[in-house]
Image: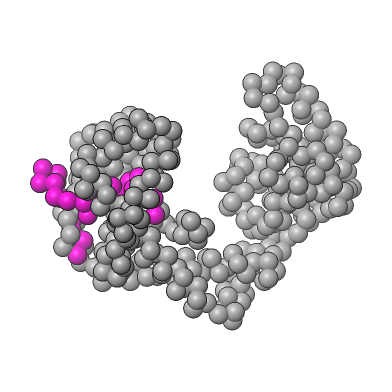
Amino acid sequence: MNRTVRAIGVCLWAFVLAGFLVGCGQRTKDPVIMRINGEEVRKSELDLLGRNVLVKAGIQPGSEEGRQYLKAQLDNMYDSLISLYLIQQSAQATQAEPSEEEIDKAIGAFKNEFPDAAEYEKFVEMTGLPVSEFRLSFKNKLLSERFQLGKLEEARKNLTEEAVRQWYDQHQDQFRAPNMLRIRTILFQIPHGASPEQRVAVKEKAEHIRQNLTGADEETFATTAREISEDTPTAPNGGDLGFIPLRSARESFPAGVADSIFGLKKGDISPVLQTTMGYWIFMITDDEQDFEEAKKQIEDQMVIEAFAKWMNEAREKATIEILIGPQEVYAEPTPAAQ
């Protein structure tokens, strides 16, 4: 799937993993929490969304921690359901329906995401959907994917070189230090289950290499990375991570490590820094991303912004009635996803 699609706030897989009941039949015993353009949204949809939110956060559904986490996320969950419905409604109004073969293929691909058939059947049972509604959920997912892809492609076609460059000029601080750096790295992995002695040996090796790199230029660092780095994806490229925004570094590394890296200047080599993966040495090779280097990244961002603008306009035009608000829906300490 297109990387830009995955970057959108409304995840396409949410229709399957979290929004299985979106638009899928009548549940008269299930309270209606809101209406979106006259279409009822039921509490069971919020429950399934809540379960997915907890799973993604690594929190056990039904736990006290889970209840407190969902309580803090309820406003966002309501917004997500509204977005899901608006996308689906627009898709149903504009997209050709997928064939039965396409639906079968989508269900088959989803089934393959599970470790075995038993886990898949357990999930299907958990949804409580009869076969017809289970298939309908996948039809809606395919329709919504097509709609979003179409919107993204339309936005990309409308981009001009002038507009992209203007965006770059208006956001130049994002593309230079201290917000953006190009980084090379060498990793010394700590073996799984390593003893204290083994850890010390790995660190001593890293410190020895770091000492040998004192005053080294980029090519020497890159050659060393190709020869000894245990970061498999980057070692063949001389440890080149490319341009990394500070926010992404903080997501990938502990905050202290990220801040240490971004405290360096072009040409600097870091001291040995530790994460759960092992010991790292970083080198800053560039401190400003020029327009050509940033162009694809900017285009992706502008496409996402265009979709977000469409979503905001769709919400402004929609008739949204909140019947049971976020602070009322789980008034009692009942887990959202039991």
Q: Please report the residue visible at 80 percent of the width from the left and 38 percent of the height from the top.
A: 228
Position above or below: 140 against 212: below
Part of the protein shown in magenta: 12-37
Q: Is residue 273 visible?
A: yes
Main SS category, magenta section = loop
Q: Is residue 187 left or right of residue 134?
A: right
Residue 213: % across, % down: 87, 43
Q: Is residue 21 magenta?
A: yes
Position of 160 with respect to 338 (left or right) is: right
Residue 247 screen position, x and y as percent: 58, 52
Q: Residue at horizontal 27%, vertical 49%?
A: 135
Q: Is residue 39 above or below residue 108?
A: below
- Place of residue 96 in the rendered image (x, y in percent of width and height, measured from the top left): 30, 67
* Residue 335 visible within the image: no
The quadrant in which the C terminus is found is top left
Identify the residue at image location x=20%, y=36%: 332
> Which is more toward the observer, 273 or 12?
12
Magenta-span inclusion, residue 80 = no
**Residue 164 falls left or right of residue 206:** left
Name the residue rendered at 14%, 50% in the picture: 26
Q: Point out the residue furthest to the left here.
A: 28
